[in-house]
Amino acid sequence: MTAPDIPQKQKAVVFDQPGKVSTKVVEIDVPEPGVGEVLINISHSGVCHSDLGIMTNTWLGLPYPTRPGQVGGHEGVGKIAKLGPGTESSGLKVGDRVGVKWISSACGNCQPCQAGSDGLCFKQKISGYYTPGTFQQYTLGPANYVTPIPDGLDSEQAAPMLCAGVTVYSALKRSRVQPGQWVAISGAGGGLGHIAVQLASKGMGLRVVGIDHGSKAELVKASGAEHFVDITQFPSDDQGKALVKHVHSLTDGLGAHAVIVCTAANAAYAQAPPLLRFNGTLVCVGIPENEPKAIATAFPSHMIAKHWTITGSAVGNRTEAIETLKFAARGIIKAHYRTEKMDALTSVFQEMAEGKLQGRVVLDLSD
């Protein structure tokens, strides 16, 4: 079944000079859905810091440099325009609103998939890197992996939840923090961080200490943080001692039960472990860019004495994506965002690279 008036050509934003902050609006063919795929008319796409890393080739863990002409994006929301062969049993129909995530497809059969770790799938495809992403008006998605968008949730609000929202939701769950306990969120005013603050405080009953640049204090407090810590007010040459003392003073004198690092800054990782109390958990989310660096000095005696747990959290699974969107549909979490057109994407990335962007940007992909 096909929606009427599917064009042969569409507008897309590509990374025209990978390695640099540069994008270009081009015209490309509208793809045809293959077996098991649906064609989605994308109306909105969130812009993520991961897109910046892919565009600038600063994520050195990826298997190859980004190719010129790559369509980026992995937070896309739109309506199904056409069903490909073999999708009859999917329950989807033309006109349904669905979303495309960071992991655009997972095999569902490997051991990570069977364990509910879609983000670790051995055959995963990353949207906007392995496949053409969501910075275009039409894109393809596997019928068994696109995410249904709840009725009543605006597409602009839904888009950031497909990566930022589900990523921090999964990270908070991995922290094992219980209602009433303390969580410190580093990078609390960023695209991931401000949603993490809301989920923690309003959705999961946690007490939040938000850590970020002073310019983001208002956003972090409005998101539900009980305390805001302006990282610029603490010396950088005292091995974090003043910061640790202050955060401990805010959290019953013992430190946070968990620290979620949402920023990609190496310094944030170096500062994070001492903020924990006994039995605390550090959850690593933000991915540092460029050449690998030691992110913190390992003190086994501290880890042993305090029973600290250190874990990574790449991205949530398909069930957690649906749960995150339900939080958003209920109004528990809302992305702080502004809307831009496709031709503004380069300037958006420049803001992001300079650390000036508060919350999220959502692209309006209409003409």
Image: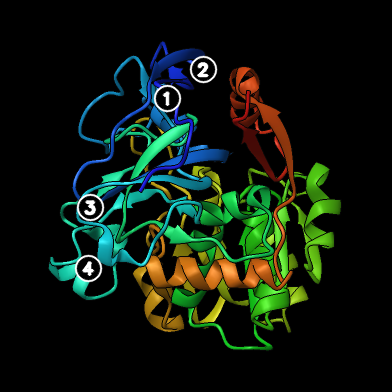
Judging depth in this view, the residue of 253 and 167 nearest the camera is: 167
The Cα–Cα distance between marks 1 and 4, rounded to whole angstroms, is 28 Å
Whichever of callouts 3 and 1 sits on the residue coming sooner in the sequence is 3
Whichever of callouts 1 and 4 sits on the residue coming sooner in the sequence is 1
Q: Quadrant location of the C terminus?
A: top right
Of helix, strand and loop, which one carries label 3?
loop
Instruction: State the image coordinates of residue 99 (x, y, percent, origin top left).
Output: 48, 52
Left or right placement of residue 123 versus residue 315 in this view: left
Left or right placement of residue 349 versus residue 266 in this view: right
Instruction: State the image coordinates of residue 227 (x, y, percent, origin top left).
Output: 80, 67
Q: Are marks 2 and 1 in contact (CB under 8 Å)?
A: yes
Of helix, strand and loop, which one carries label 2?
loop
Whichever of callouts 4 and 3 sits on the residue coming sooner in the sequence is 3
Q: Name the residue under label 2.
A: 21
| Farthest residue, direction bottom | 179
Mark 3 surroundings within 10 Å by alpha-carbon count, few (fewer than 14), some (14 through 19), many (20 or more): some
Q: Residue at x 49, y 44 (%)?
A: 266
Report the disc number at residue 55. 1
| Farthest residue, direction left | 110
Q: Name the residue under label 3.
A: 36
The Cα–Cα distance between marks 4 and 2, rounded to whole angstroms, is 34 Å
Tell me the mark number nearer the camera, choosing from 4 and 2: 4
